[in-house]
Amino acid sequence: MDIDVSGIIIRGFAAYTFLLIFTRMLGRQIISQMTLFDYVVGITIGSLAADMTLAGSDNFWDGLLALAVWIILPIVLGWVTLRSYKIRKVVEGEPSLIIVNGTVDKQALQRHRFNIDDLMSSLRSQGAFDIADIEFAILETDGRVSVLKKAQKAPLTPKDLNLATPYVGLPTTIMEDGNIIEHRLQEVKLSKEWLITQLRNRGIHDISEVFIAQIDTQGNLYVDLKKDGPK
């Protein structure tokens, strides 16, 4: 049997391109807050894209149409659920309290088919090993468990001790893989010449050696080289 190698490559590239475009249209929620239904939709879309690659040229456009339908429907449904509370609760469900004041709600676990081993695993991932220490635990619609510990079991914070803390903020990445990100330098009001001088002071004369460089809100420069350790 002859294999249409060039046709498979072309159709695979086209399917990949269309899938990339369509998934960008879906947005990030399908990944960051994936429900069981979103998971099934994602698998189906991937299966259709694979079928498009292996299908003959006559069936390619049929597969593309089917893929478009499976992409458009979640977009429309997402638009509807954003505007309708009732439909959103039907499609996505609601979070459920499964622990209240150190007591597990067995009926809620049974209703969501969530066994005690799954619960304990989820609690440990939140740093909660003793159910008695938990004020509330909520089973989210994506299967995650959110935990609020009792006040006497919560860790101390600087605010609890009336300690002043400096502002930390997020560091700014100004170099990646040997490339200077000039617009990031402008954001932190620094120049390319300043950065090169700082690198030379650290014995770095070739910027292509730099894997990543960041500057924090206190003005401290962190440099990690491709071959050596951080400086």
Image (cartoon, rainbow, N blue to C red):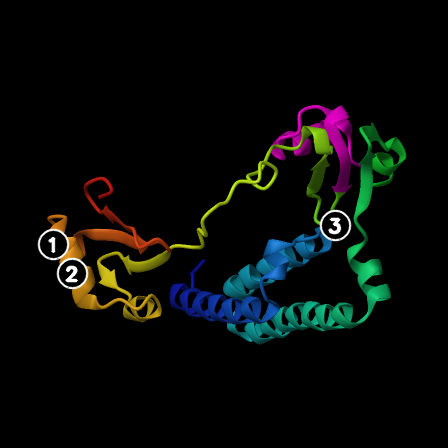
Circle 2 residue: 196
In the image, taking residue 107 as reference, residue 51 lies left or right, namely left
Specify the segment rendered in magenta. Answer: 113-138
Q: Residue at x 86, y 38 (%)?
A: 108
Q: Amino acid at mark 3?
A: Thr
Q: What kind of element bears circle 1?
A: helix
Mark 3 highlights which residue? 141
Residue name at image x 77 percent, y 67 percent:
81
Residue at image coords 82%, 70%: 84
SS of the residue under disc 3: loop
- For the residues bearing labels 2 and 1, Cβ distance under 8 angstroms: yes
Tell me which corner region of the image, top left, top right, bottom left or bottom right, holds residue 40: bottom right
Residue closer to the observer: 78 or 60: 78
* Residue type, label 2: Ile
Where, quadrant-wise, is the C terminus in this rendering?
Answer: top left
User: Where residue 161 appears, x then y in whole percent?
Assistant: 58, 36
Q: Are the two marked residues, 2 and 3, in contact with CB atoms closer than 8 angstroms? A: no
Judge left or right: residue 194 versus residue 33. left
Using the image, determine if residue 218 lies above or below residue 116.
below
Label whose residue precedes the other's in the sequence (3 or 1): 3
The residue mark sitting in front, 3 or 1, is 1
Residue pointed to by mark 1: 200
Quadrant of residue 22 within the rendered picture: bottom right
